[in-house]
Image (cartoon, rainbow, N blue to C red):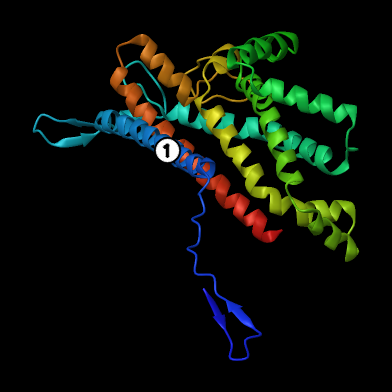
Amino acid sequence: MSVRSGSGKSRITVDISLPTRKRTPWGPVLLKWLCWLAGVMTMGVLMLIVLYILVNGVPEFFFRDENGALQFKDQLFALKYNSKNLSMFPAIINTLLMTALSLLFSVPLGVGGGIYLAEYAKPGSKLVKVIRVTAETLTGIPSIIYALFGMLVFVVTLGIGISMLAGALTLGTMTLPLILRQTEESLLGVPMSYREGSYGLGAGKLRTTLRIVLPVAMPGILAAVLLSIGRISGETAALIFTSGTGTRIAGLYDSGRTLAVHLFKLQEEGRAVGASFAVAVVLLAVVVLMNALSVYIAGKLTTKG
């Protein structure tokens, strides 16, 4: 539409055409819905597994006496195991000990190696490339291969024998690549401005790494530790070959079974399937408690840093 002024010299033009509608790209929308679908399916499967374990396992902790009263099966937590009480208490203690020993071996080496690769190694170094490829390869190796490795190296060659120590070294070797790579990636994800600001204030390399960079990367390192706890707690093949199936509370050089191995042996015998579901409930609770403790410790370290 055009409008002419009184002098006839100027003209004002007004565009009254309708705005064109912008097309929404379908790629990001599709990716968003796929992410939502994957998240819902993951949570759904997790809830189904937990519900199945609880429904079948919780009733195994109770029985009815002659008067019909509901009683707790305290024999499941007796100090010593026998074929009648099927106590899981020694397996609980062995699981905690095995987890602590394995992490004591893998966490310092993994975190230290990740710090070296991310902060001290020369970029593009052949050694760094070899370590990364090796760690990624070891992450995908089946646990039965680690079982054979642990039996040949720790049990036979080093003469440790079938013991908790041999099992912990095997599981520590199994979880080391995961912690190493996750630590490196977490440290590389910290912005360089954090380091530059610390250097500008006069801090050295070590102080910057420990007090500035490492606390920021702690959530990623924690994720690797939590995954390692889950893998250690649920491992069976590697421990049957290295730590054995002893039924008592084991020392470092004694054979002892964890909760996962205890569950496997109960299922294998076939006469204590119900008790194996009770063991699964306790194993689930132990893993949740250890993860919660790890989150609490990491939170304290992050706050202190």
* Residue ID for mark 1: 37
The amino acid sitting under disc 1 is Leu
Residue 10: give x, y in percent of width and height.
65, 84
- Position of residue 296 relative to residue 165, above or below, is below
Q: Residue at x 59, y 25 (%)?
A: 251
Which residue is painted at 88% across and 27% down in the image? 127
Q: Element at badge 1?
A: helix
Direction left: furthest residue: 67
**From the viewer's perspective, is 71 left or right of 188?**
left
Work out whether residue 64 or residue 125 is closer to the camera in this orientation and state it. 125
Q: Nearer the viewer, residue 7 or 268?
A: 7
Relative depth, front residue between 83 and 121:
121
Q: Position of residue 248 (x, y in %)?
A: 48, 22
Instruction: Say which of 284 and 157 sits in front.
Output: 284
Q: Is residue 144 above or below residue 207?
A: above
Q: From the viewer's perspective, is 76 left or right of 36? A: left
Please state, as top left, top right, bottom left or bottom right, where the C terminus lies in the image: bottom right
Q: Residue at x 33, y 30 (%)?
A: 53
The quarter holding residue 160 reads top right
Q: Residue furthest bottom?
A: 6
Total numbered labels placed on residues in the image? 1
Residue 49 picture location, percent across and down: 36, 30
Q: Residues within 10 Å of mark 1 (few under 14, many from 20)?
A: few
Residue 280 appears in which quarter of the rendering? top left
Q: Is residue 256 left or right of residue 301?
A: left
Where residue 30 appears, as percent x and y from the top left, is 48, 40
